[in-house]
Amino acid sequence: MKYFVVVLLLFMLGSCSQNTDRLPILGERDTIKRMIEGKEVVDTVYHTIPDFKFINQEGDTVTAQNLKDKIYVADFFFTTCPTICPVMKKQMLKVYDKIKGQPDVAILSHTIDPQHDTPAVLKQYASDLGVKDAKQWMFVTGEREKIYDIGEHHYLVVAGADSTAPGGYIHSGAFILIDKEKRVRGMYNGTDDQGTKRLLADIERLKAEYNNAP
């Protein structure tokens, strides 16, 4: 919960302080000082998604290299989820249909129940959704603690086991927008049309940001 509050605060600050044509950069940030031609220059170091190693629905290894030079949308789910996951996947299908065939945009869905959600289970799940391109929409599994760690400490969402929650797991319903530098650029309610529409609009804004870069 504390990560969600921090992200909301940073989102509001970023929205007020940055050019409205550019999406804010969310998460904690540091500054570093260095000397250039005898002058001290202060640079900002932004929060980024670290390298990772998971397995997708085809049984192939997925790392950050698979998303090099791509904008992507991340989320967390599990295939037996009895609550928000079916709604989230219905909304994410709208994103998938919109970005289908675009080589610079992808989706990365992390299961939080890796014991049950093997690559074979994820492949059937993707097939049932009508997802045919495992390179554009990757459903990934891996070591439980690494999935939880990257969710809570890097994507800034709740993701983990909880015996009191329906299905035995608790996770955020957020869709997280990541830019080509692996920075968090937006968080959206993945359970309603309004959040999905905002996400799709911001994907276009982010693409324009890159296209208009000097």
Image (spheres, rainbow, N blue to C red):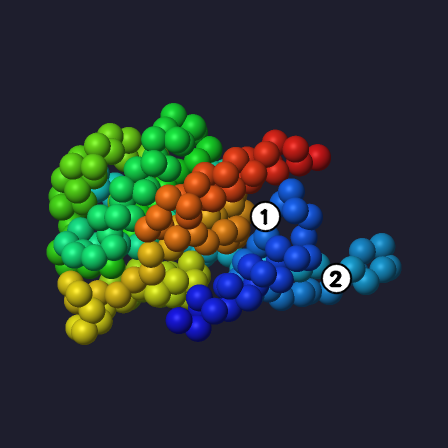
Which quadrant holds the C terminus? Answer: top right
Q: Give left or right: position of 186 versus 91.
A: right
Q: Name the residue located 21 percent from the left edge and 65 percent from the top edge.
A: 169
Q: Describe residue 65's horizontal placement relative to residue 113 as left or right.
A: right
Q: Residue furthest right?
A: 38
Classed neighbour count for the residue bearing mark 2: other residues with Cα under 10 Å, few (<14), some (14–19), many (≥20): few
Position of 36 relative to 128 (above/below): below
Q: Which mark is residue 42?
A: 2
Q: Residue shown at 20%/69% (left/top)?
A: 165
Q: Which mark is residue 74?
A: none
In this rendered view, identify the residue nearer to me: 51 or 112.
Answer: 112
Residue at point 39%, 31% (across, down):
98
SS label for mark 1: loop
Nearest the viewer among 142 and 108 is: 108
- Local SS, label 2: strand
Give the alpha-carbon distance from disc 1 to disc 2, as whole Å.
22 Å
Q: Nearer the viewer, residue 175 or 27?
A: 175
Q: Earlier in the sequence, mark 1 or mark 2?
A: 1
Which residue bears the numbered disc 1?
23
Q: Quadrant of the N terminus?
A: bottom left
**Mark 2 belongs to which amino acid?**
Val
Left or right: residue 4 compared with residue 165: right
Q: Is residue 204 above or below residue 45?
A: above
Q: Nearer the viewer, residue 73 or 188?
A: 188
- Residue 40 appears in view: yes
Whether residue 208 is situated above or below residue 189 in the rendered picture: above
Name the front one of labels 1 and 2. 1
Where in the figure is residue 37, as x and y percent of width and height?
A: 85, 55
Residue 94: x %, y % from top left: 34, 36
Amino acid carrying label 1: it is Leu
